[in-house]
Amino acid sequence: MENNNNNNNNNSNNNNRPRPKKRVTRKQLRNRRIGGLIVLLLIIFLLSKGCASCIRCACKSDGKDDGKSSTTTTVSTEAAVTSTTESALPQENLVEKLPASYKIENVPEIYQEPELPTGSEVTALTMLLNYLGFDIDKQTLAQNYLTCADRGDATFSQAFIGSPFDSDGLGCFAPVIVDTAMKYLNTQGSDRTVKSLNADTFDDVLLRVASDQPVLVWINTNLELMQEEYCFTVYGTNGIYTTTPPPTTSVVIMGTTAPQVTEATPEVTTAALADDFKQDVYWIPNATCVLLTGFDTVNDTVTVIDPLQGEITYNMGMFKTSYNALYKQAVVIY
């Protein structure tokens, strides 16, 4: 019994003794530090995400800030749309240097006869529009988009005099074809530009051809030069054309300067003279419109598609002379 008590006492003393601490190795200490650093970085990351969410929520919950944010977004969107639209607008993209020769391929040949015996202008325009990918025929273009007028009611720069469907129709000049093309393109929702060149030099016209832009050009048929002939007289009163002569007179030949008003009778006042005039209108009987599609400066030639004869090659010098005789009229679409 006594021995048992001694053993119990010894065990109790052993239990009360402090246990030796485990020794931490350097590797364990390093791993603990790395683990702690990872936990710390994770906590920082979660806190930052939570703060950002709080900020966004606060902005959305504030009515005034939300309104400003919405306005800013709308303006940015509109600016982006505007930028896209502007960049989508067709550009001239002209070549920097005129090559020695150039030929535009795959331009459709359309003949004005028999439907439009005097409609070279609108037929040439139809070829150009078809080349650009628009599905329009010459008769529809002439019937629905070409402005026509009777003799004495307008000039050749204001309307086609007569009708292209009639053999006694006369014709029109570049401003009328520009107007016709613009009216058609507007119905198609097209942003293309219609431009009347009236170029100072013929190289300006050739530069367009070298840039894949067929050019509508007014010339004499077969380049046979003819003198202008008197056609009719139009009268203007306060900017309105009429066939009734006003009490003042002036004479203007097509292609020259603006009307010069002169006093017809002593009793006409100066104020009336400023608004009343008459204009004698002249026309070149064999004027026609062709589509210029190529040139060769080495051989001194140009290639055109004539609505009456199809593709023709002309001497460049003679072509330029005829072009000048028709007041250097040319139209492009890009």
Image (cartoon, rainbow, N blue to C red):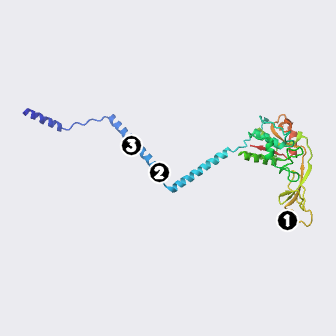
Amino acid type, mark 3:
Leu
Please give the count of numbered marks on the rendered protein. 3
* Residue on which disc 3 sits: 40
Quick one: label 1, few (<14), some, or many (20+) residues within 10 Å? few
Q: What is the C-alpha distance between the residues marked 1 and 2?
A: 73 Å
Q: What is the C-alpha distance between the residues marked 2 and 3?
A: 26 Å
Which residue is located at x 63 percent, y 47 percent? 81
Q: Earlier in the sequence, mark 2 or mark 3?
A: 3
The C terminus - image quarter = top right
* Residue on which disc 2 sits: 57
The N terminus - image quarter = top left
Quick one: label 2, few (<14), some, or many (20+) residues within 10 Å? few
The relative height of residue 66 versus residue 19 in the rendered view (above or below) is below
- Of tags 3 and 1, the one toward the viewer is 1
Give the quadrant of residue 309: top right
- Which residue occupies the foreground of this view, 153 or 296? 153
Q: Is residue 1 left or right of residue 177?
A: left
Amino acid type, mark 1:
Ala
